[in-house]
Amino acid sequence: MIKPDGVQRNLVGEIIGRFEKRGFKLIALKLVQSTVEHFEKHYADHKGKTFFPRLIKHMASGPVVCMVWQGLDAVKTGRAMLGATDPLQSPVGTIRGDYALAVGRSTCHGSDAIESAEYEIKLWFPEGVVQYTSALETWIQE
Ligand code: ABT
Ligand code: MG
């Protein structure tokens, strides 16, 4: 997901481009202005933490771009591409290491486990994702 700060900073194309160029296949995409209630479900794991209200307020403050990317080890590799939770600790070359400074303005969110990806995909794409064959697939996966 590209967070409101990422959208406002015109990083949508840059972030999508990195996932495309890495070789992942886009199977769902939408720009949405969502609600506090929906983000409370999205970040349910963090409920009760001190930063939770601030986090939810920021996420609901503007449109976000929801995406599902498919490919080898997508969760783990996607998180590595995003970088560390604290952008200041995130290596140059990662999205956060290149474009962010503050923990609460980290430009993008990535599912942290296969189970959370499944939960988040259902939450943001209840209509389901798109199944199709990409002509590039055999050039990216053996
Ligand atoms: P997300 O991809 O947004 O979930 O970030 P990440 O998984 O790297 O980090 P987690 B731990 O899930 O943090 C979620 C959001 O909460 C913010 N946060 C986190 C704080 O503001 N203070 C903290 O101490 C921690 C641990 C950072 C994340 N995003 N924003 N915006
Ligand atoms: Mg997280």
Image (cartoon, rainbow, N blue to C red):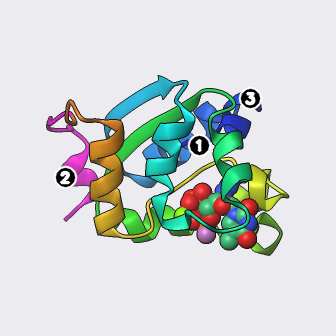
Q: From the viewer's perspective, is residue 102 above or below residue 11?
A: below
Q: Nearer the viewer, mark 3 or mark 2?
A: 3
Query: Which image quadrant shows ligand 2?
Result: bottom right
Q: Which residue is mark 1?
A: 15
Question: Magenta stretch?
Answer: 130-142
Image position, residue 67 (x, y; %): 41, 40
List x then y, in percent, for residue 41.
44, 49
Q: Residue at x 45, y 54 (%)?
A: 22
Badge 1 amino acid: Ile
Give whichever of discs 2 and 1 has the lower sequence position: 1
Q: Label 2 neighbourhood size at 10 Å, few (<14), some (14-19), many (20+)?
A: few
Q: Are marks 2 and 1 in contact (CB under 8 Å)?
A: no
Residue in view at x 27 percent, y 45 percent: 122
Callout 3: 10 Å neighbours few (<14), some, many (20+)? Answer: some
Residue 68 vertical placement versus 33 (above, below):
below
Most prominent secondary structure in the magenta stretch? loop
Q: Quick check: 10 above or below 14?
A: above
* Dot 3 amino acid type: Gln
For mark 3, what is the residue? 8
Verify whether residue 137 appears in magenta.
Answer: yes
109 displayed left or right of 134: right
Q: Quadrant of residue 127?
A: top left
